[in-house]
Image (tube, grey):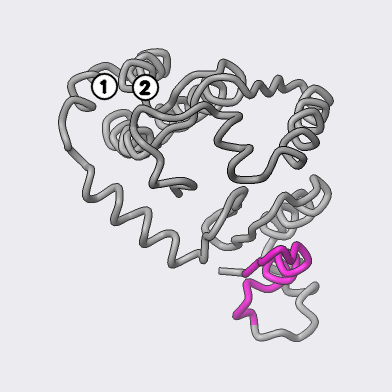
Amino acid sequence: FQLAPTLPKEGVDKLEHYRRKFGEFRVNTMVPRMKQVGRAHGLEFNYGGRVSNTLDSHRLQLWAERTGGRPKADALREILFRTYFKDNGDIGDAATLAAAAREAGLEGAEDFLATDDLLDVTVRLAEQKRREYGVNGVPFFVLDNRVAFSGAQDAKTIVHIMEQIVKPEGDAADDDDGGDGDDGGAAGRAAGAARGGASGL
C-alpha cells in the first residue's frame, strides 16, 4: 500500500513532509512519543532523511518473492523497515534498494530496477488488495489472510486476535456463541473488538 503515491521519486525532507501532513504541534508531540515507545521495545526510530515515492520498493519486494521466495522477500522487508525507520535511508532510491536486496541475499536487483519489469502488475495487485481488504491508511494488519483490521492497536488486542486464529477448530466453535461463522468465528469477533475498522475475512 502506497501511503503517498504522489510523492516525487527524488523525495522530500521527511520531517517537513510530516509537518505539512500532520501539523507542527502534532509532529512535535508524535516524534518524541514514537521514540520513547520504540526504545521500550528495543527499537530505535529516527526521523532524518527523506521520504519518497515507494513504488520501486513495492516492485522490488514482488521481484524478491518471485526470485528468492517468501523467506528472501521477508528478509528484504525487514531490511527496508530498518533502512527507513532507523537508518534514515531513502527507500525510493535505486542504489539503496539494490543494497538492501544484496543484504537479503538477492543478486540482480540493480538490473531489475533499471527496467519497468513488474511495474503494471505491482500497481494492479496493490489496488486489488486495497479494495479487497478496505485499506485506506496505515498501520493495517492482515493475519493469515483471514482477519484484517486497521489502526494502531495495543499489543494485547493483537495477541488476542492471533490466539483466536490459531485455536483448534473445535475450540473456536465453542467460542462462537451459535454464530454462522461468516465473520471468521471467534477470530472475526476478535477483530471486531479492534474497531478502528476491523473485519473477519
Task: Find residue 42 and report its image quarter.
Answer: top right
Queried whether the magenta region covers residue 82, the answer comes back as no
Q: Which residues are magenta?
A: 181-199
Residue 146 as seen in the image, left or right of residue 128: right
Badge 1 element: helix
SS class, disc 2: helix
Tell us which disc is closer to us: 2 or 1: 2
Between the residue at mark 2 and the residue at mark 1, the CA separation in whole angstroms equals 8 Å
Report the side of 79 relative to 199 (left or right): left
Q: Choose between 201 and 166: the one closer to the eye.
A: 201
Q: Amino acid at mark 1?
A: Ala
Q: Amino acid at mark 2?
A: Leu
Q: Nearer the viewer, residue 25 or 38?
A: 25
N-terminal label among 2 and 1:
2
The vertical placement of 22 against 27, above or below, is: below
Task: Tell me whether circle 2 and circle 1 mark residues in contact (CB < 8 Å).
Answer: yes
| Residue named by callout 2 | 97
Q: Residue at x 80, y 45 (%)?
A: 155
The image's mark for residue 109 is 1
Q: x, y (%) of residue 10?
A: 35, 27
x, y percentage for residue 174?
79, 74
Q: Position of residue 185 (x, y in %)?
A: 68, 73
Q: Quadrant of residue 17?
A: top right
For image coordinates 40% across by 40% down, the residue present is 7
- Where does the image place residue 80, in percent across and percent down from the top left? 48, 26
> Within 10 Å of the Cα at label 1, are there few (<14), some (14-19), or many (20+) other Cα atoms?
some
Residue 188 numbered mark, or none: none
